[in-house]
Image (cartoon, rainbow, N blue to C red):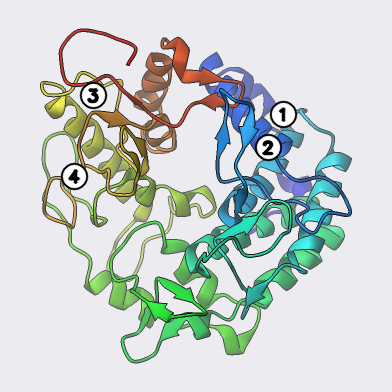
């Protein structure tokens, strides 16, 4: 259920009472989304936000991520509430972004994962992404409801045009995972991960003919494995590699705390237990890798010593094996679990802040790796 802007509790005093590292990170993240977006009003790429930014070279990448735009839209109310921008600035940024999104290339309402930062067109052979479109829709609805007026109208229109049924396999009752015009659909969302938002958005579409029933959710759950209670956490439903972002992203937009499904599952509690498992795993592996420990955890997709990998994760996971492990930790892994394990997440943030090379004008860099020996270095 949405609440309008005038019904939102003023939380500024509460925010000011948290540890400074939290507000530092919050401000750095907001600045990234706000400052790196394309803001030339005549640009066909207005509102696009880069997938990557090199803080050492002060240079953004050539392509945007449509998910970055969704998170960027959702950050605008945070900027207003913390008085980093005015409400008029946030409204105008939202309005112009939503207007341009309506003009961008898409298929059945779904956007390409990556877009050219200057032309506003599909980047290379990027796929039409259901999950990244879902994040965009969630961000648009968040900003639209907060600012109201034409912003809310345009956000609802964007949502209403997404044909979830087109991206759904009626025979298997599962959403496909990817689509390219050249090769068609591939893969399937067949276990729990970051896509919980899909089932909510698809079932609640304003356009009846675009809706997908709860069969999709039930089939996903039937294929999802649950681990037993171990160590400091209860059993939880596992994602494939155990990348911690899979337990976080839907919670950025949907408050699952007081929602229990037909099988008695509370997905908020599930993410609490997964986060505790990630901490335990880091402590266990700290004897092998000096990067890991109770203050350095959150294995998730990121850049490692050999480039990007989506296979970083922790056990137990549905894959049933040790996920990619080489001593790399992504700070946002622990930070993203702050709703689930606030004290542990803040402790990790304080630890990361002790490394000079880790901090930038937009908060923490992507990842760090201290190698495998016991001595402390700045590798």
Tag 3 and tag 2, C-beta contact below 8 Å:
no
Q: Tell whether 37 sits left or right of 337.
A: right
Tell me what residue is drawn at x 30 percent, y 72 percent.
220
Q: Position of residue 377 (x, y in %)?
A: 29, 9
Looking at the rendered image, the quarter that the N terminus falls into is bottom right
Judge depth for marks 3 and 2 and give the one in front: 3
Q: Position of residue 224 (x, y in %)?
A: 22, 66
Residue bearing mark 1: 82
Circle on res. 292:
3
Q: Residues within 10 Å of mark 3 (few under 14, many from 20)?
A: many
N-term-proximal mark, 4 vs 1: 1
Q: CA distance from mark 4 to mark 3?
A: 22 Å
Judge depth for marks 4 and 2 and give the one in front: 2
Q: CA distance from mark 3 to mark 2?
A: 31 Å
Judge depth for marks 1 and 3 and give the one in front: 3
Q: Position of residue 313 (x, y in %)?
A: 25, 43
Tell me what residue is drawn at x 40 percent, y 29 percent.
331
Residue bearing mark 4: 234
Q: Provide the secondary structure element on which disc 4 rests.
A: loop
Does residue 339 sit above or below 186 in this rendering? above
N-term-proximal mark, 4 vs 3: 4
Residue bearing mark 2: 78
Tag 4 and tag 3, C-beta contact below 8 Å:
no
Residue 9 visible to an observer of this rendering: no
Judge depth for marks 4 and 3 and give the one in front: 3
């Amino acid at each position: 259920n949405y609440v309008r802007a005038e019904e939102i509790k003023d939380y500024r005093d509460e925010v000011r009472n948290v540890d400074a590292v939290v507000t530092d990170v919050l401000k750095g993240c907001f600045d990234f989304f706000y400052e790196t977006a394309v803001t030339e009003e005549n640009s066909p790429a207005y509102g696009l936000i880069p997938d990557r930014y090199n803080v050492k070279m002060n240079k953004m990448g050539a392509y945007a991520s449509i998910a970055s735009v969704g998170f960027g839209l959702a950050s605008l109310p945070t900027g207003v509430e913390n008085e980093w921008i005015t409400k008029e600035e946030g409204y105008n940024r939202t309005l112009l972004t939503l207007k341009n999104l309506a003009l961008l290339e898409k298929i059945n309402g779904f956007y390409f994962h990556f877009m050219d930062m200057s032309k506003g067109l599909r980047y290379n052979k990027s796929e039409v992404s259901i999950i990244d479109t879902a994040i965009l829709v969630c961000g648009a609805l968040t900003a639209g409801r907060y600012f109201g007026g034409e912003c809310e109208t345009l956000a609802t229109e964007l949502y209403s045009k997404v044909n979830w049924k087109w991206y759904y396999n009626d025979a298997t009752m599962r959403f496909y995972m990817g689509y390219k015009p050249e090769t068609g659909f591939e893969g399937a969302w067949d276990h729990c991960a970051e896509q919980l938002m899909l089932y909510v958005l698809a079932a609640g579409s304003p356009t009846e003919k675009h809706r997908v029933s709860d069969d999709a959710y039930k089939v996903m759950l039937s294929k999802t494995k649950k681990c037993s209670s171990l160590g400091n956490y209860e059993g939880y439903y596992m994602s494939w590699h155990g990348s911690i972002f899979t337990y976080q992203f839907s919670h950025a937009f949907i408050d699952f705390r007081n929602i229990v499904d037909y099988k008695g599952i509370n997905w908020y509690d599930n993410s609490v237990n997964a986060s505790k498992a990630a901490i335990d795993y880091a402590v266990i592996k700290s004897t092998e890798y000096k990067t890991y420990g109770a203050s350095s955890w959150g294995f998730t997709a990121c850049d490692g010593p050999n480039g990007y990998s989506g296979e970083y994760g922790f056990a137990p996971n549905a894959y049933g094996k040790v996920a990619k492990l080489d001593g790399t930790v992504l700070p946002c892994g622990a930070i993203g679990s702050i709703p689930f394990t606030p004290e542990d997440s803040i402790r990790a943030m304080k630890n990361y802040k002790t490394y000079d090379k880790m901090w930038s004008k937009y908060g923490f860099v992507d990842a760090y790796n201290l190698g495998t020996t016991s001595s402390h270095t700045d590798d």
